[in-house]
Image (cartoon, rainbow, N blue to C red):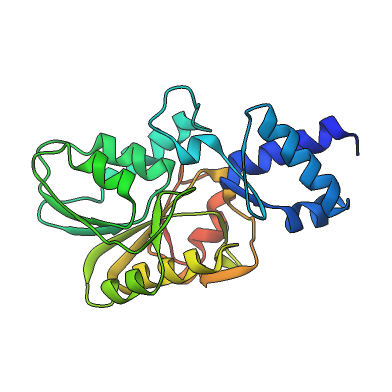
Amino acid sequence: MRKSKRQEFILREIDLHNKVFSVELSEQLNVSDDTIRRDLHELAQEGKVIKVHGGAISKSFVAPFNSEHVVYAVESKKKIAAKAITLLKNNMVIITEGGTTMLELAKMIPSSLKLTIITISPQVAITLAQHENLNVIGIGGKLVKNANLYIGASVVNQLAGLKADLCILGANAFSSEEGLTDADWEVVQVKKALMRSAKKTAVISISEKLNTVKWLNICSASQINYLITELNPTDPLLTHFIQKNLTVM
């Protein structure tokens, strides 16, 4: 594969999953680790990605408040956020993580809604704090600076004592057969803890992340109550999720 096509693939993966790992890319593209490292270095030098240990991350994922960085598929994420808001009712306790779709949701919450929202994302907490009727609680721990999330044993322990009405999770990869998966061990542990801390779980995801799989399992598809995408619920892509008894929105 030519370098231009290879780098185009890398940028697409970063847009889709926010973060890529050099080892995974070398396997997907059947090239050496050194080749991938050179590609990531060039893309970082061109200002297209941020190079981190073991891979690279999306600039929009790190700094979504900065207008210079365009959020990938932002219109689709706004549609998803608008649908997710219909699940929120007065006096509910919501628990969530971060991500660009969750940030869009945070911006859209009607000022009349009275909610308690617990989050492991400082960016989401700051956005929510602008709403007068929201009680915002931040769960702290080890900060993943490149993702603006708190992770680690401290976060998991704090979540253990909670029982929210609804957990809202973003998706790195979601398959009807393999379930919700990710490629970051510590993030997976926190997502599992978030789910345990709520009565129901909703996954918010652009459709491009559906039917993709990462190597670490978070939960099966049947453990998710709601799947919210930008698609019409009758779209054939969602059929297998409906068969797993998810409410598709």
Q: Is residue 247 above or below residue 219?
A: above
- Name the image quarter holding residue 150: bottom left
- For this view, does 134 lie left or right of residue 1? left
Q: Residue furthest top?
A: 68
At x 75% / y 58%, what residue is drawn?
23
Quarter occupied by the N terminus: top right
Q: Is residue 105 visible?
A: yes
Which percent across, then down, holds residue 190?
41, 68
Q: Is residue 155 above or below residue 109?
A: below
**Number of numbered discs present?**
0
- The residue closer to the viewer here, 123 or 97, is 123
Q: Is residue 231 visible?
A: no
At x 43% / y 62%, what residue is drawn?
246
Q: Is residue 163 above or below residue 73?
A: below
Q: Is residue 121 above or below residue 11?
A: below
Which percent across, then down, holds residue 140?
29, 61
Which percent across, then down, holds residue 58?
56, 39
- The residue closer to the viewer here, 60 or 85, is 60
At x 25% / y 47%, what residue is drawn?
125
- For this view, does 243 lie left or right of residue 169? right
- The residue closer to the viewer here, 29 or 198, is 29
At x 58% / y 49%, what residue is drawn?
209
- The residue closer to the viewer here, 17 or 120, is 120
- Name the image quarter holding residue 83: top left
Which percent across, then down, holds residue 103?
35, 40
